[in-house]
Image (cartoon, grey):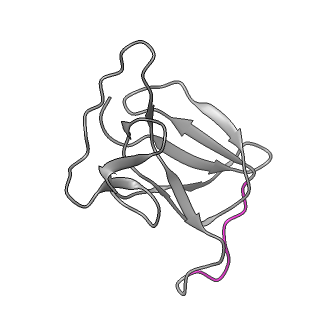
Amino acid sequence: MHGYPGADGLAADGAHVVSARRTTNGYLAGVGLLGPEPTVSLATGTTASASVEGLLAPTPSQSACPTYTTLLITPPNETHSVRLATGSLCDLEIHPVVPGSTGRGPNT
């Protein structure tokens, strides 16, 4: 597995509201300062993860945060998705898939 999952905010009626911006690093997670996007091989019993981050308040360029109730997450190079109930965040970001369950690369 390599790259970024899709992460889209959906309204209660299922309408698309926002797509997460793809970034290698954020405030709390990502691939780390020293590495490119890793390729993750998943053997039985192993885990890969990616972190979604955002802000609780609008950025100076936003007048308000988008409102959505669900995140639609799609693994890289896949077509099946999972829906997760969530609260809204401003400046929504998704980071690349990394080995393990923390969404953090070894140099983060």
Looking at the picture, how far across and down is residue 12, in whole percent?
A: 80, 47
Looking at the picture, how far across and down is residue 16, in whole percent?
A: 63, 49
Q: Residue furthest bottom?
A: 60
Viewer-closest of 71 and 98: 98
| Residue drawn 73% across the image and 42% down it | 14
Give the magenta part as a residue range.
62-68
Q: Is residue 104 above or below residue 48?
A: below
| Residue drawn 61% across the image and 40% down it | 72
| Residue drawn 43% across the image and 26% down it | 78
Q: Is residue 47 above or below residue 98?
A: above
Dominant secondary structure of the magenta stretch?
Answer: loop
Query: On the rendered structure, is 67 left or right of 94?
Result: right
Viewer-closest of 65 and 39: 39
| Residue drawn 36% across the image and 21% down it | 42
Looking at the picture, how far across and down is residue 96, in whole percent?
A: 36, 46
- How many numbered marks does the figure carry? 0
Residue 74 among magenta residues: no
Looking at the picture, how far across and down is residue 100, in whole percent?
A: 42, 35
Query: On the rendered structure, is 81 left or right of 103?
Result: right
Query: On the rendered structure, is 46 left or right of 105?
Result: right
Q: Quadrant of residue 37?
A: top left
Q: Quadrant of the N terminus?
A: top left
Q: Residue furthest top?
A: 44
